Amino acid sequence: MKDTTILITGASSGIGKATAELFAKEGARLILCGRRQERLDQLKEVFNTEVHLLNFDVSDRSAVFTAIETLPTEWKKIDILINNAGNAHGLDPVQNANLDDWDAMIDGNVKGVMYVTKAIIPQMVKRKAGQIINLGSIAGLEVYPNGNVYCASKFAVDAFTQGLRIDLNPFGIRVGAIHPGLVETEFSMVRFKGDEARSKSVYAPIDALQAEDVANAIGYMVSVPPHVTIADITLLPTDQANATVLNRKP
Ligand code: 8X3
């Protein structure tokens, strides 16, 4: 992957970081995006590959377009975009939910994916080449209790991915999504606002997916021959049958 440039959002932790590690090992050139500069710096230090860092918030429309427009010339050709940034905030019934949580999920998970994609696709369209992989979720395929707006945001990612695949079809650009179930990352700590016990209780009853499992599936989506598009992968822990059915350990 030596001459392949991959841009990953939300690269400082979890699935984004594991994906960056996987592609760094394969020698890809990486543009790592995130909000936590120190974490990005640490990755750049240990990766044995060319890395460019971008510190911006995907939900900040002008920051997104400025960051992409002002990339140095040698980083302007992006072969693969991995729209990974996104979070859940709260797990409450609609009637009790916090509106700031809703805004954060719609702004980050939905608008963020759209802004970054819109900023990056002109050079893909021009070159008639490229690949875009969006991080969906099992929550974007099924609605679960109290998931309401988080599920809505991931359903939107799924719809946007499908629309993008249609619109970019004339240009030979591959578009797909990956829909993970429970992945043991900082996801629940963010969702439950730092409540460690509640966060642990999400993953403890099962053998959850690890960030590396999702990264490996993304690696597969990228590795197939150019005439093949993996449109969707739904990746579940073996202990998870769907959004709500878990084979809990005794
Ligand atoms: C993360 C998976 O099931 O917690 O998107 O919504 S779930």
Image (cartoon, rainbow, N blue to C red):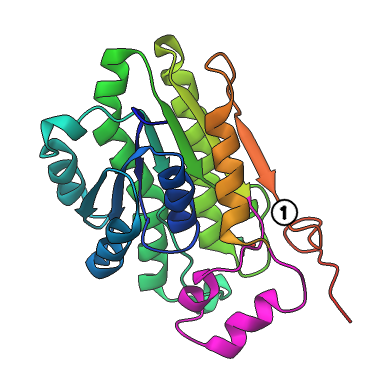
Q: Quadrant of the C terminus?
A: bottom right
Q: Is residue 198 magenta?
A: yes
Residue in the picture at 39% in, 23% down? 130
Residue that mark 1 sits on: 236
Q: Is residue 56 magenta?
A: no
Q: Toward which corner of the image does residue 76 lie, by quadrant?
A: top left
Residue in the picture at 86% in, 68% down? 247
Q: Name above or below for residue 19 compared with residue 76.
A: below
- Outermost top residue: 170
Point out the quarter of the image occupied by ligand 1.
Answer: bottom right
Q: Position of residue 217 (x, y in %)?
A: 61, 43
Q: Could you say which is closer to the camera, residue 42 or residue 191? A: 42
Q: Quadrant of the N terminus?
A: top left
Residue in the picture at 46% in, 15% down? 169
Q: What's the amino acid at mark 1?
A: Leu
- Outermost right residue: 250
